[in-house]
Structures are given as C-alpha cells and as structure tokens.
Amino acid sequence: MSSPRDPATPRALSDALFCSRGLSILLVVLVHVMGVESSQGLRKLFVPERADLRFAAGLLHSFNMAVMLMNSGAAVFLFAEPNPSFLEFTRRKLRKLVVPMFVWAPVALGLQELLRGGPRTLDGWLVWMGRLPTAWFPPYGIFWFVHALVGCTLLAWIYRRLVPAPGPWAGPGYLGLSLLAHAIAESWGAATVGVGASYLRLILFSNCFFASGLALAPGLGPVMRGLSRLPRALQAAVPVGCLGLMVALQAWSSTEGPWAPRQLNGPLGFCMQFSLAVVLLDRARRAWLLRGLVYLGSISMPIYLFHIYFVSGPRQALERAWPGAPLPLHLVLGALVGVLGPWGVYRLLRPNRAFRWSIGLS
C-alpha cells in the first residue's frame, strides 16, 4: 500500500493523467481554431498564409492525438479491470465510444451539408441520405479517433487474454509487436489500396502510440517520485525541454510519411504533459489550474463532440465587428468559446438521461 507521503499514489497518478487529457482537449480545440489545413480556421484568413500559424498548427497536430492515445494506453494499464470478459469489454466500448459516434457523427455530417446550402431537390435529399452510413465508416471528420481507440483497446484486450499473467516485459513486448505489425502493414501499403487497407493502417499506426502508453505505464509512478524530488527549476526544465525538442523536430523535418522524424513528437508530448502535471501537483499555488485541467479531462468527450460547432463562430463574428483584428485575440476568443460552448451544452443537458447516454455517460 502506498504511503500517505508517497507522491505517486493512485489518486495522484489518476490526477496527472486527467490533467494531461484536459490539456490535450484544450489543444484539440486550439488546433481547430487555427485550422488543420490551410483552407480551415484562422489559416484561411491570410493570403499568403502566415508561416507562424502554419507552423504552430503543424506542431500541435504532430503530437496531440498521439498523446491522447498514449494517455489512454497508460490509463488502461493502471486503472482498467485487468481481464474483463469479451462481453463486458464490448459493452463498455459500445457505451463509452461507439454510441457517441453513432449518435453524433450523422449530426455533424448533416450540419455540414446544411451549412453548404443543403439539398434542394428530392434526388438531392436521397443522395444525402445515401451518404449517412459514411458518417460511421469510413470514419468521418474527428470521429477517426473513436475508431482508432476502439481498435487499439481491442488489440490490447486480445494480447492480455493471450498473456493472462503478464510479466515485466509484457508491455515492451506488446509495443514491439505493435511496431512490427505497423511496419508490415506499411510495407504492403504501396501494393494494397482501398478503404479497408487504409483503415487497417490507421488502427495499427494509432496502436503504436497506445502501446507506448501501455508500456510506459509501470514507470510513471517512479518517474513521478523522481520528478517530485527535483528542485523546482529542474522540474520546470523537463516540460520546457520537451517542448523545445518538439519545436526543433518540427522545424527540422519537412518529411511526410507514417514515420517522419517529427513522429517522435508524440512521446515527447506525452512526457511534456505528464511532467507538467507533476509540477502542478507539487504546487499548491497552482492547484486551481490543476483542478481545472483535471475537470476538463473528465468531460473531454462532450468537449470533443461539440467543440467543432463553436470554433468558427467567434472568427466570423470578429471579422465582421473588427476587420483586421489581431491574431492573438482570434486565438483566445476562439479557444474560449470552443471550450465554454460544449461545457454549456453539457451542463444544460446533463440531467437528461438520453443525452447522457448519447455521450457515453452511464
């Protein structure tokens, strides 16, 4: 049993992972305010496109979803039931992940179509209705992450069933198998085309990060203890150093591909966010910030589902009210509304049982 003075109690580890998840969901909102592509978000306001905005969006996109996958892998190792039955595993994934995607992906697809003007004829409506199944597969918009997470957890469940009494090398062994499976899938990728092949590569690529989190999970407690013993300046140097390395990798690498050098940003981003959570845990004066990030991590699903409806409104309103408004104001206002909007929807509709069911809450 952990000592009361142990800085790596289960509660502290849980808070650190929720804090990291809360920061990740904030960055998801921010990158969508900026725009993942040059034709999206704030990036499309500038012709020619601003290099600093393009670089910042590319940097966030290079590590943030990988961090969320690693965070999920670590949480599965540390806190999930060790060996659930397939029926129980399926029930949980359906409730927490598949149902929210099943309910809200068609809503996102329909709203996008209406914003474009919507069908104006019966044939147009029939064509649109024929597209509805594509809201679920292949993954539409942001919902690729749900597919990735379900696939990763399923592969991990299969591995744990095959290794019912895992030893210290089970995690690294699973990571090695995941990297090997991904390498094989990529080697066949040039000769294999189609939605099924692309989907398989998506799952296996995502699983490399999920498996990394699962493999690192046993060391998070010792790392937390070690960081807690460091002087404050050295503690702060860890997340700052990780951020500096990520910026350098992003600037150095212009290579596209499944294992471009900047893919190292995923593990570096996880180290940055976990070490930052440890710093906040050790600072009573920063407790408000820690509690806020932990809370955002606990409601990450509604923010993830609904933020996309709120991030563009502030940009359009500010453009009309203040043409040429400074970029920092666009970023702050967009991120603020992108978080507070989904939070307001969640708070307003939370008492409704059907709504709670639709976002994966029991």
Image (spheres, rainbow, N blue to C red):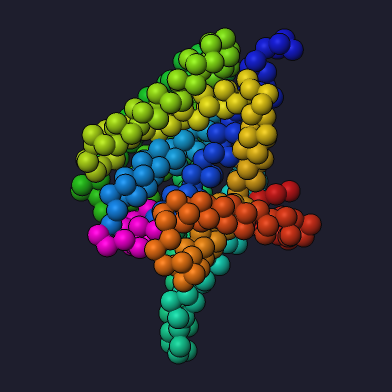
* Residue 362 can be seen in this image: yes
Which residue appears at 40% of the width and 38% of the height? 63
Q: Is residue 188 left or right of residue 30?
A: left
x, y percentage for residue 42?
39, 58
Who's the residue at 73% across and 55% down the image? 347
Main SS category, magenta section = loop
What residue is drawn where x is 53% and y is 11%?
A: 231
In the rendered view, tell whether residue 202 sits above or below residue 109.
Answer: above
Q: Quadrant of residue 264?
A: top left
Q: Position of residue 87 (x, y in %)?
A: 64, 42
Across and down, in percent, residue 74 comes to 54, 28
The answer to if 239 sits in the magenta stretch is no
Q: Nearer the viewer, residue 100 or 290?
A: 290
Quadrant where the image shows the N terminus: top right
Question: Can you say whether 275 is above or below 204 in the image?
Answer: above
Q: Position of residue 36 (x, y in %)?
A: 38, 53
Q: Residue furthest bottom?
A: 121
Q: Name the residue nearer the viewer: 177 or 342.
A: 342
In the rendered view, tell whether residue 99 sits above or below residue 296: below
Residue situated in front as seen by the camera: 80 or 88: 80
- The span shown in magenta is 36-48
At 42% across and 21% down in the image, what residue appears?
A: 173
In this rendering, does residue 82 appear at all? no
Magenta-colored stretch includes residue 42: yes
- Picture quadrant where residue 256 is located: top left
